[in-house]
Image (cartoon, coloured by chain):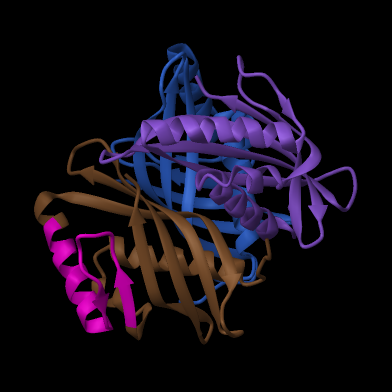
Chain colours: A purple, B brown, C blue
């Protein structure tokens, strides 16, 4: 049960990362992955690689949410940070919840997931090199 | 995507701040705002300024919860901390959830919000100078 | 409203602690208590003391979840850390949520609780010496 002094940086990173996604800044969100970053969502959705493809997939999802009038909020929590292969990478396992609020309606819990990330340092912050999300149930 | 070394202090502050509110210590909660602190809740509720008015508004809400037999739990998460105008202030954007449990009943998700705070240093801790809460949906 | 520099270690500890429990590694989870650690759950469930008994109780609960086909996720949040009796112990008060997802189904909020822990240092990490959980409602 090792711990990592960069813990708070990872929390700050996830906050900014999800604020970008949930606010619809999908290009900004894609830029928080490495240029060749890969996102492996729960099946049957296929893996997506590269900032261009990540931005495109996120923009499509954002458009669907907007058409439905829904607000999505991604919460990462119970964040466990492990050293990566070198000083500039970390392995993270955390829980992820998605809360959805329809226009004029009450919020609901939409998904409970586990997220496994390989993050790499990018100056003062971090980028996602690889993400695998497993959906409960 | 700048980060701030005072990140953990802010998390500790929010924990104490919400424990005070949810436990019904409304005067203690109001004392975690600056003397002239302002809370701008989601419309149509009006803005409230000053510790006395904040304590009064919180006490009224606590009384209503007690009469209904409800327990409220405020969760802040996905906390993004940015430097403020000077070394003793920070700007925070975070998500906020409110969970409500009726006496003898099951908990439910009541609200999903975004909270934007201006916090100022107060010795070893922080105070809220200005808060704006936007409710999803 | 004192704050504690070991704050991030506690968050990392809780993440690992709950990942062990929720993944069914109940012996691993019990090992994150002290040898004589005590868990006082909400009534009417009785207090459990000692790693062997903790592992046994957790294994029984894990077996029940598995038979139902449910996934449980324990979230600690709004974590307030206070100094303990000496430099190697801390008192924590936090909120705890339990989300349950049935096989093939949608997740639901199962419980909202308050958790009060006495944690003691164990080398680079921490152990639970005493835990009391109060369930809302």
Residue furthest toward the left?
Answer: B67
Q: Horizontal placement of C136 versus B69: left or right? A: right
- Residue C34 visible in the shown view: no
State the image coordinates of residue B59 (x, y, percent, origin top left).
17, 69
Q: Could you say which is closer to the camera, residue A104 or residue B129?
A: A104
Residue shown at 51% from the left, 58% from the top: C118
Mark yes or no: residue B130 visible. yes
Residue C48, image x and y in percent? 45, 39
* Front one among A56 and C103: A56
Whole-percent x, y for residue B126 in the image: 48, 78
Give the vertical position of A110 relative to C126 (above or below).
Answer: above
User: Which residue is at a point 56% across and 61% down the rendered structure image?
Assistant: B80
From the viewer's perspective, is residue A61 above or below residue B41? above
Query: In the image, is A110 to the left or to the right of B38?
Result: right
Q: Quadrant of residue B62?
A: bottom left
- Magenta span contains residue C48: no
Q: Position of residue C62 (x, y in %)?
A: 50, 23
Q: Any magenta on residue B53?
A: yes
Q: Please provide the residue range marked out in magenta.
A: B37-64
Residue A34, quarter of the rendered image: top right
Residue at x 64%, y 42% (from the top left corner): C16
Q: Nearer the viewer, residue C52 or C133?
A: C133
């Amino acid at each position: 049960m090792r711990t990592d002094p960069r813990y708070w940086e990872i929390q700050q990173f996830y906050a900014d990362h999800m604020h970008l996604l949930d606010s619809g800044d999908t290009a900004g969100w894609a830029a928080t992955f490495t240029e060749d970053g890969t996102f492996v969502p729960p099946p049957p959705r296929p893996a997506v690689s590269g900032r261009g493809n990540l931005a495109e997939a996120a923009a499509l999802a954002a458009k669907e949410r907007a058409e439905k009038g829904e607000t999505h909020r991604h919460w990462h929590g119970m964040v466990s940070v492990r050293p990566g292969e070198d000083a500039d990478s970390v392995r993270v396992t955390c829980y992820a919840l998605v809360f959805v609020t329809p226009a004029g309606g009450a919020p609901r819990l939409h998904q409970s997931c586990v997220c496994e990330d390989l993050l790499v340092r990018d100056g003062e912050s971090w980028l996602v090199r690889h993400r695998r999300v497993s959906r409960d149930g």
